[in-house]
Image (tube, rainbow, N blue to C red):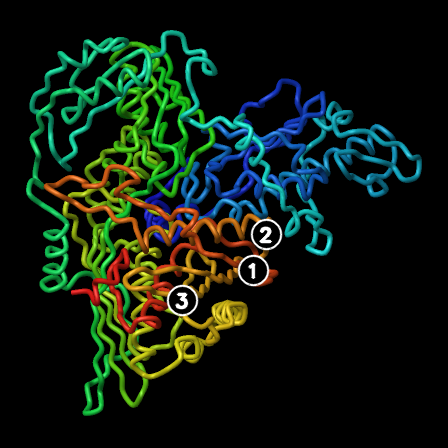
Amino acid sequence: MSLNRRQFIKSTALIGGGLIIGFELAGCRDKTLAPAVTADSFHPNSFLEITPNGDIILQINRAEMGQGVYTGMTTLVAEELEVDPATIKLIGAPSHPDFIDPTLHMQLTGGSMAVKNSYGPLREVGATAKAMLLAAAAQDWNVPVTTLIAENGRVRDPVSKREVPYSALIGTAKTLPIPKYITLKVPEQFKLIGKYDRRLDALQKVDGSGLFGIDLCEHNLQREGMVYAVLVRCPHFGGKLKTFDASASEKIAGVSSVFAFNDNSVAIIANGYWPARKAARILNVEWDKGPLIGVDSTALLALLRQQLDSNDGHKTTDEGTAPSNTADTQIIEAEYFAPYQAHATMEPLNCVADVRADKIDIWTGNQSPDMFRAAVADILKYPREQVFIHSPLLGGGFGRRGYADYAVEAALLSQRVGKPVKLQWSREDDMQHDFYRPLSLSRFRAQLQNGKLVGWQHKIACPSVMHGILPMFAQTILPPWTPRAPMRMLSNLVATRDMTSTEGAAVLPYAIPYLRVDYVHYDPGVPVGSWRSVGNSINAFFVESFFDEIAHALHQDPLAYRLSLLKPEQERTRNALQLVAEKAQWGHAPIGSFQGIAVHEAFETIVAQVAEISVEGNNIKVHKVVCAVDCGRTVNPDIVKMQMESGIIFALSAALKGEITIEDGAVKQTNFDDFEIIRMNEAPEIEVHIVQSDAPPTGVGEPGVPPLAPALGNAIFAATGKRLRALPFKLEMVSYG
């Protein structure tokens, strides 16, 4: 692989707008194919196989974590291959060059780009196989290929009435060259794209046959001698282990050893998870609390304010000329805040590791087998080709399972004890040792003249997500012998210009004569990472809430004002706003209910939402959320709706309940009793309307999240006249600051 400096910097710079930004069909006959799943199969490329007994096997190079990617990608292949998607057997692809995203030079799931980037290439996978099977039938039957028809997994000759399944043709098909040119269907010919409404992973998740990382044990892995591990980690960020007394823990039946691990934790090894966990609960341990001793959330907020006051930051956007103040200039200023957020995936982190002299096997749900392989190999000093990552289903990812810390822990433990190890995190471990969505503080200043918005200044202070991601990408992309010092320097530089910190704020859909956005990087020492929709989830709340403030200051209807200021090229945004307004009956909320509106573009997808609420005392009741989404051509409309619904509920939890707070340099929250999520009886009615489009597909996994918080906050203002500028919303806080 050749990767020059310009390509590398370009790839890493684009991560802020989406972790996956390209895809191409790999694995043709002029290269070494990824290993076949079944011997003697027809294996025209690394993704697809057809076996002699008729099985169609598709290796999926993206992680299925509930977002429906298995169904979406299979639909693309099945459309061109002329088979029912349900007849295709799906397997998570191993780490292999043919499954690498060619732009980022790694295999990775994120940025809502899996189906978007696979739309053309995976259709080519199916179309190529179909063309070769038709050619094989034409050769076997000595007829023109143009007279043959492929349908329902069979090739038939309308003239002779001959008909055979694909499996009967693979012997000849394997001898044929890969066609240089293929013809893809036009939309008018689609039978599945835009129509297929079955979730291929639904049944196995209902009947329990679907295998998640947390399900892996000695019974289905057959790892002889496997033990279980629990880590008691220092709760204080940057803290270290001082002393521990394991005398009580070692008496628990099934516990085999207790030892210090990685200078900030204690490992407990047992013959089962519960003995190890029980021993962990009674371990007597003393910590050195480290550099954040005494630091709490109030202090962190004060530090962010101090940064906004004293640090000019990096100028991200500077468009137009700053207007001079005149006698009629009206200045509107506001400060908005978003706290740390946990990923809180349904399945806590876990990993099975088997470290041997000549190889390492890792079984874990992950979003990037390449990054996990590089991390494990480099830490344990193994050649990367000796590390094998096995990827089961994920019980949620949201960005968290792109970080390989838990796989590295499991591998080190296996190496230490000389046996296969299953490391299982508890919910408390997961909550208190996350890579959190950053806390962020924004300061706005708008200038109004003659009833018009003429100036918009926005200054953001927060930690950098890219500061932590860039070294992981470098470790994966670059050879192991590459010096790390230059990458650390580049990482520090990127941190001060992190596009994930300003995405959703640096570019606005509105025509404003003067737009200025500045970013101040400040890292207080709490680990941060990608969280569903990354910076968009924060900045959409800031921007769309403040824009609503301006509309009300000008006595304008929030919808009409948005439409009036949209740039001419924002036709998609206009369509989404008009559709959501129509479906929500904007301006005609039921008596006692109030509406708020917001719109945002993330990952090339436009989402507009209207929240309908009522308020009793300090209680906010969300009755309904209406959503309009423009995501280009929809491959699976039901999955698009599911993802919008999922994003709305996910965002609603963060807007009304979820918050990670710091006390004495440690996370206060431990479980869902103090990090609450929306319950079923609190969930609103949700309507999702898809804007019809012939454009290529865009992302849907994350864009449903950003507009919810501002739409809800704007509805709260409509109901109460109180502008809440901090998340989660609390009505007793009349204003923020």
Which numbered tag is attached to residue 711? none
Q: Position of residue 624 (x, y in %)?
A: 46, 61
Instruction: Give SS at disc 3.
Output: strand
The image shows a total of numbered marks equal to 3
Q: Earlier in the sequence, mark 2 or mark 1?
A: 2
The residue positioned 10% from the left and 60% from the top of the image is 306
- Say which quarter of the image contains residue 25: top right
Residue at the disc numbered 3? 598
Q: Position of residue 687 (x, y in %)?
A: 52, 59
Q: Is residue 543 left or right of residue 390?
A: left
Residue at the disc numbered 2? 637
Instruction: Give SS at disc 1.
Output: strand
Q: Position of residue 69 (x, y in %)?
A: 52, 41
Q: CA distance from mark 1 to mark 3?
A: 16 Å
* Amino acid identity at mark 2: Pro
- Say which quarter of the image contains residue 447: bottom left
How crowded pointer 1 is (Cα within 10 Å; few <14, some 14-19, many 20+) is rated as many
* Amino acid identity at mark 3: Ala
Viewer can see residue 589: yes
- Say which quarter of the image contains residue 432: top left
Instruction: Give SS at disc 2.
Output: helix
Viewer can see residue 30: no
Residue at the disc numbered 1? 690
Q: Is residue 288 left or right of residue 179?
A: left
Q: Are marks 1 and 3 in contact (CB under 8 Å)?
A: no
* Amino acid identity at mark 1: Ile
